[in-house]
């Protein structure tokens, strides 16, 4: 059995989907917090690239992207409200902590959203038809 988590995100601009990704993580995570943090890190890298692209093309260059997560532990870790050693995340410091630096510089914002309102959940797990339809509507994919 493969124990690797699946990462997924959906990025919108003015209510329209501009980027999304679903992929198996390359390593096994030690916790759901670590798996979600890896996913946030992937999304942060994509947002950072999109921000550079928009700046070069003159589109919304003073925008502050808001990242949403339904995992409070991952949010606390990104905002350094927790002891990283308590999460046993020392091995993650270099590869995944780009999100911490962007938050510290106020380049991005990170907020909690209830699992019931997480539009990207259908990208990473099996969900019911109602959730898929709600997510499609939120992402303007109708």
Image (cartoon, rainbow, N blue to C red):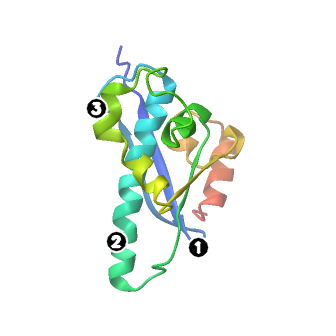
Residue 123 pos. (x, y %) = 50, 43
**Crowding at mark 1 (Cα within 10 Å: few <14, some 14-19, many 20+):** few
Indicate which label's residue lies in the foreground, 3 or 2: 2
Report the disc number at residue 26: 3
- The residue that label 2 is drawn on is 52
Residue drawn 44% across the image and 82% down it: 59
**Which of the labelled discs sits on residue 45, or is there none?**
none
Residue bearing the label numbered 1: 14
Question: Which residue is at the front of the view, 5 or 36?
Answer: 36
Q: Do the residues labelled 3 and 1 touch (CB within 8 Å)?
A: no
> How far is disc 3 from disc 2 in space, using C-alphas?
26 Å
Classify mark 1: helix, strand or loop. loop
Q: Where is residue 86 in the image (x, y as percent from the top left)?
A: 49, 20
Rendering coords of residue 129 (x, y %): 66, 42
Question: Residue 30: x percent and y percent?
Answer: 41, 19
Residue 68 relative to residue 95: left or right? right
Q: Quarter holding the N terminus?
A: top left
Dot 2: what SS? helix
User: Residue at the spot x=40%, y=69% of the render?
Assistant: 51
């Amino acid at each position: 059995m493969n124990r690797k988590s699946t990462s997924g995100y959906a990025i919108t601009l003015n209510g329209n989907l501009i980027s999304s990704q679903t992929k198996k993580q390359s390593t096994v995570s030690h916790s759901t917090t670590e798996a979600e943090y890896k996913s946030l890190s992937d999304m942060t890298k994509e947002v950072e690239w999109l921000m550079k692209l928009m700046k070069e093309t003159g589109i919304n260059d003073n925008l502050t992207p808001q990242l949403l997560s339904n995992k409070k532990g991952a949010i606390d870790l990104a905002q350094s409200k927790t002891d990283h050693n308590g999460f046993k995340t020392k091995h993650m410091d270099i590869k995944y902590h780009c999100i911490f630096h962007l938050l510290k510089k106020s380049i991005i914002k990170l907020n909690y959203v209830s699992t019931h309102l997480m539009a990207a959940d259908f990208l990473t797990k099996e969900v019911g038809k109602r959730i898929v339809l709600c997510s499609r509507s939120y992402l303007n994919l109708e």
